[in-house]
Amino acid sequence: MIDEFKIREAVKSVLDPELKKSLLDLGMIRDIHVENGQVWLTLALSTARCPRKDAMVEEIKGVLGKLPGVAGVDVRLATLSHEELEKLFPKHPLVGLEKVRHVLAVASGKGGVGKTTIAVNVALALAGRGRRVGLLDADVYGPSVPVMLSLEGVQPEEENEAILPAEKFGLRIMSLGMLTAKGQPIVWRGPLVAKAIKQLLGQVMWGDLDYLVLDLPPGTGDPSITIAQSIPHAAILMVTTPQEVALADVRRSIDLFRKFGMVIVGLVENMSYFQPDHSGKPIAIFGEGGGEKLSEEFGLPLLGKIPIDLAIGRGGDSGVPLMVSSPDSETGRVFQGIADRIVAASG
Ligand SMILES: Nc1ncnc2c1ncn2[C@@H]1O[C@H](COP(=O)(O)OP(=O)(O)OP(=O)(O)O)[C@@H](O)[C@H]1O
């Protein structure tokens, strides 16, 4: 007859994929109960969002289901307590940036050039290429990612003292805007900025990510440098516009990031031209050549030129970005090209 002892013996062989130790020995399989061949047990996970939970449940059921006398196996899921987690994993395996392969910080010389638009749509384009992508809105002056992704009013959930990013359009998203009460003015200055970002970086359960795209505050002020610097291995994606007058700000910004030892992966020129219709000639509303000029001057690749597209503005207002509503449009293909070049550059 099957009993708890036999179940324990058998289930010992199921290992935690991370720690490579028996789930039973780790205390993650508990409350085993056997009655008339039916087995009940609890699997306590590091997080309810554990990406491998289904595989672990299947393995447990597979191992126990083979035992003679077992009629059925019922696995209940639970999460480890904070104390248990700390004991098993001195550092939570999914919190912070440990499992984030690349951090891409989107910066601009000044405000309003489309930095957030580029951050959101490049993140979506990378996700469209099958990459696991997070988006951190670190724009201390006016976090606009919640509006662009219709996440207004969304408060982050917490689990075991970690903050869970919101999930939307296949991205994991966290915004400074989610940490402030609705309607409250945001006054993140000096030490507060560093503290808020440190908290975000240290406490958000980003999990396994190929890319974390960061929307930096605009300009060459303290916040953008402080934030970019506080993230190990962050590389800068610089947004520019084509007109000569805007270039001075971008030059200053590039110089400053370089002075602080930051790598710049490339330039994206936004609002490059307007295409009235498919047959007409593109109109260079804001002049032309800015991106190329900077590219030559600083030896940086120009990763793409985004047209002025009414669908981008509409996407920003409606909360459904262009790379969700029309990823294969002409503008969508430019974002795809940028994502491809980023992937190729990051290896
Ligand atoms: N290529 C484009 N075509 C049409 N509209 C655009 C384009 N790029 C950006 N916009 C629009 O311009 C406005 C400003 O864009 P966005 O918020 O992305 O700029 P930003 O540089 O992040 O601004 P901030 O400095 O305030 O953070 C938004 O309404 C956006 O929809």
Image: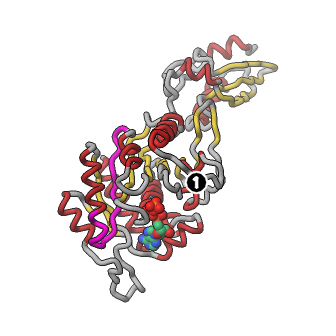
> Which quarter of the picture shows residue 42?
top right
Residue drawn at x 59%, y 29% as measured from the top left: 46
- 126 with respect to 241 (left or right): right
Point out the image quarter for the N terminus: top right
Q: Which residue is mark 1?
A: 168
Within 10 Å of disc 1 (Cα), the crowding (few <14, some 14-19, many 20+) is few
Is 297 contained in the magenta span? Answer: no
Query: Residue 43's spot in the image, x, y percent?
Result: 66, 26
> Which quarter of the picture shows residue 286?
bottom left
Residue drawn at x 35%, y 80% as measured from the top left: 285
Report whether residue 327 is seen.
Answer: no
Query: Residue 21's spot in the image, x, y percent?
Result: 51, 19
Residue drawn at x 77%, y 24% as measured from the top left: 38
Report whether residue 80 is seen.
Answer: yes
In the rendered image, the vertical position of residue 145 relative to residue 64, given as above or below: below
Could you tell me which secondary element the residue under label 1 belongs to?
Answer: strand
Is 237 contained in the magenta span? Answer: yes
How many callouts does the rendering have? 1
In the rendered image, the vertical position of residue 31 relative to residue 231, given as above or below: above
